[in-house]
């Protein structure tokens, strides 16, 4: 007997083509997860909710929120969707499929873990390159318009950066040719991770409090509030790349000072 998930998947592949699922389906899932997870931090700012967990005390004005949302809709429609459509033949060539049976969870989770590790490595170096003087001025400074980030700023970037760093996200799936279900799950987890890292809030239930080597909002918020030449904390998900290459020293010193300050109270 088919599981509810398999029955739902059977419905999808019966009523929609592989192309529709891989392009429009992926786009719809991405937009839904991104905006539903990213909008709460705007609401928190506007209503003053959870202020004791806010990393920076400064709030963005409503006009800044609205400008961010407007540009995101434009970029997602004019950049993300066309890229999904154009890259479809490459993914099918590499072996991506949508047919039943769904892959076992051991395969799904091992592939997603590989994607996270590979993405973090590639993103780290790409991000460091974007912090060189010319590329920062002409490309990456768009993302840093918001020194006080909120969830939706995670994908607020120059179109060239969307393509450049987006390569880190799609490289793992492109190499392994996963099942479409695995690709969707990877995309959902990656979106939730980057939105949380840009949320501007460090809650007691934040993943960085429980997952070893996970960076999270506190780690990435430090990157946004400093000058581009001194920021560090370049990795997307984990902290070990910055630790290995010494690009988290300023953050570690600040954390040590805060810890000492609490200890002397």
Image: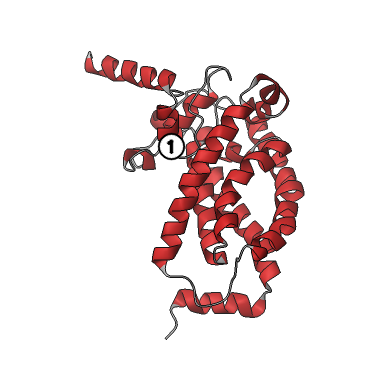
Q: Residues within 10 Å of mark 1 (few under 14, many from 20)?
A: many
Q: Residue at x 54, y 75 (%)?
A: 9
Total labels: the figure holds 1
- Nearest the eye: 105 or 254: 105
Residue 35 at least partly seen: no
Q: Is residue 52 left or right of residue 126?
A: left
Quadrant containing the N terminus is bottom left
Q: Secondary structure at mark 1?
A: helix
Quadrant containing the C terminus is top left
Q: Is residue 263 left or right of residue 139?
A: left
Compared with 229, 177 (above or below) is: below
| Colour scheme shown | secondary structure
Compared with 193, 109 (above or below) is: below
- Nearest the eye: 166 or 31: 166
- Residue 201 location in percent, x, y? 44, 34
- Residue 55 location in percent, x, y? 44, 27
Q: Residue at x 54, y 48 (%)?
A: 191
Location of residue 139 by image quarter: top right
Location of residue 261 by image quarter: top left
Q: Residue furthest bottom?
A: 1
- Nearest the eye: 212 or 45: 212
Q: Residue at x 51, y 62 (%)?
A: 182
Location of residue 22 by image quarter: bottom right
Mark 1, residue position: 216
Compared with 162, 183 (above or below) is: below
- Nearest the eye: 76 or 46: 76
- Residue 239 location in percent, x, y? 41, 34
């Amino acid at each position: 007997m088919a599981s509810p998930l398999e029955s739902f998947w059977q419905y999808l592949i019966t009523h929609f083509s592989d192309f529709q699922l891989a392009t429009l389906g992926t786009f719809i899932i991405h937009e839904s997860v991104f905006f539903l997870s990213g909008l709460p931090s705007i609401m928190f700012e506007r209503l003053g909710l959870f202020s004791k967990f806010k990393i920076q005390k400064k709030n963005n004005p409503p006009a800044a929120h609205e400008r961010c949302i407007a540009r995101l809709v434009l970029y997602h429609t004019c950049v993300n969707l066309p890229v999904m459509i154009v890259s479809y033949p490459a993914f099918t060539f590499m072996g991506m499929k949508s047919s039943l049976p769904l892959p076992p969870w051991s395969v799904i989770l091992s592939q997603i873990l590989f994607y996270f590790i590979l993405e973090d490595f590639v993103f780290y170096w790409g991000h460091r390159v974007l912090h060189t003087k010319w590329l920062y001025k002409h490309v990456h400074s768009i993302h840093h318009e918001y020194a006080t980030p909120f969830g939706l700023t995670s994908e607020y970037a120059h179109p060239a950066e969307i393509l450049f760093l987006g390569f880190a996200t799609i490289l793992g799936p492109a190499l392994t040719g996963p099942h479409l279900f695995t690709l969707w799950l990877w995309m959902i987890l990656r979106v939730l991770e980057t939105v949380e890292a840009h949320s501007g809030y460090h809650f007691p239930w934040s993943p960085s409090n429980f997952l070893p080597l996970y960076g999270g909002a506190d780690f990435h918020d430090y990157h946004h509030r400093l000058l581009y030449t001194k920021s560090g904390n370049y990795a997307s998900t984990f902290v070990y790349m910055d630790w290995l290459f010494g690009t988290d020293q300023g953050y570690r010193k600040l954390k040590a000072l805060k810890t000492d300050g609490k200890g002397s109270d």
